[in-house]
Structure formats: C-alpha cells, structure tokens
Image (spheres, rainbow, N blue to C red):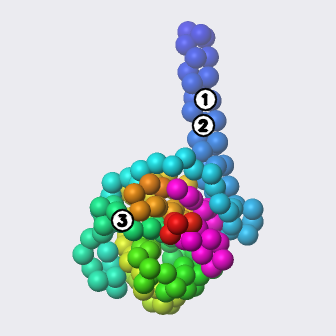
Amino acid sequence: MDAVLTKRNLSFATVVAAVVALIALLVYGMTGRGDGSLGALSTPKRAAPDFSLTLFDTSGGGTFSNADLMGHPTVVNFWASWCPPCKEEAPHLEQVWQEYKDRGVIFLGIDVQDNDDDALEFIKRYGITYRNGPDRSDIALDFGMLAVPETFFIDREGQIVGKFAGAINSEQLRTFVEELLK
C-alpha cells in the first residue's frame, strides 16, 4: 500500500512540476525582459499552417486563408487589445504596411484571447487598415505562438522564414520585409 501511495505522490509531483514549468514559461513569454520585447528568434523554415480566418468587418469581412498568401511576402502579427506591447507596436505595423502594401506585401493581424468589441476599438484607436480577424480556431497554436505579440514572416512560397517575439518597431519590420522581397 505504501508503494502505491508513493507512486501516486511521485506521479502527482511530476504533474505539478510540469504545470509550474509551463506557467513559468508562459509568464516569461508574456513579460519578456521586462520591456515586452524579446526580439528576433531563430525558427526553422517550415510551411505556414493551414488556416482560415474570418475577418472583422473593418477589414472588409469575408475570410482569409493560407492559400491567399501564396505568392506574396506576408507579415502575420498575433496581438490582443489588452496587451501593452501590442499597443506599442501597432503604429509601427500600420506605418510599414502603408509603405509596402503597393509592393505586394500582405499584413495580417490575428487577434487572440480577446473580445470583439475591445479588438475593434483597438483597430480603430490605432488606425489599423490591414486585414485583421479573431483567432477562433487555434491558429496561434498552429503557428507555435507562445505569447502576444509575436510576428511571423512568410515568404512567397508559403514558408515561415522568421519570427519576432515582443513589440516590433518600424526599423525591425522593414528589415524583415526587405528580406522577404529579395
């Protein structure tokens, strides 16, 4: 009987340790280095996951899928209205979108863990004009997003070639976009 209890206690302790480690990883991902930015992260080149995103009406409504990005350099930004670093980077994303939209670059915002009213207010407040929609089908998990904000860079062949964790600025965005355009 003692061996069974010890085994159960050990199993329980292992589960608790795993949960604590996961929570610590999520908190680290959400807070970064204290300023909300982590920077460019190494990511193996891989195909962007299949997804279909229902767009907010402010983006013209309809849907957007990974098939729509084929042939276009694409910036996919995961964000939430309650996220302070997302507020910091929003003007930079819009600015760079305006600079590159006529060169075939697609910007796509995917709102996560948010409610639509707050998300729409965020889009309005920051004057965001590129396509945006709420993640209702675990697109963020399929991409491998750990915390908001995170930005993924996808080449014309639909391959994820870069990832930036934390608030990204205009200069950093331009560097990634220029690489996508080569």
Q: Mark 2 = which residue?
A: 18
The magenta span reads 161-178
158 and 54: which is toward the camera: 158
Q: Which of the two residues, 117 or 169, is positioned nearer the viewer here? A: 169
Q: Name the kind of residue labelled 1 in the image.
A: Thr
Mark 1 crowdedness (10 Å alpha carbons): few <14, some 14-19, many ≥20: few
User: Residue type at mark 2?
Assistant: Ala
Using the image, tell me which numbered label, if any, was put on residue 163: none
Which residue is denoted by mark 1 in the rendering? 14
Question: Tag 1's secondary structure?
Answer: helix
Q: Position of residue 181 (x, y in %)?
A: 50, 69
Q: Amino acid at mark 3?
A: Gly
Element type at marker 2? helix
Residue 85, visible in the rendered structure: no
Distance from the alpha carbon under mark 2 to that under mark 1? 6 Å
Q: Nearer the viewer, residue 138 or 174?
A: 174
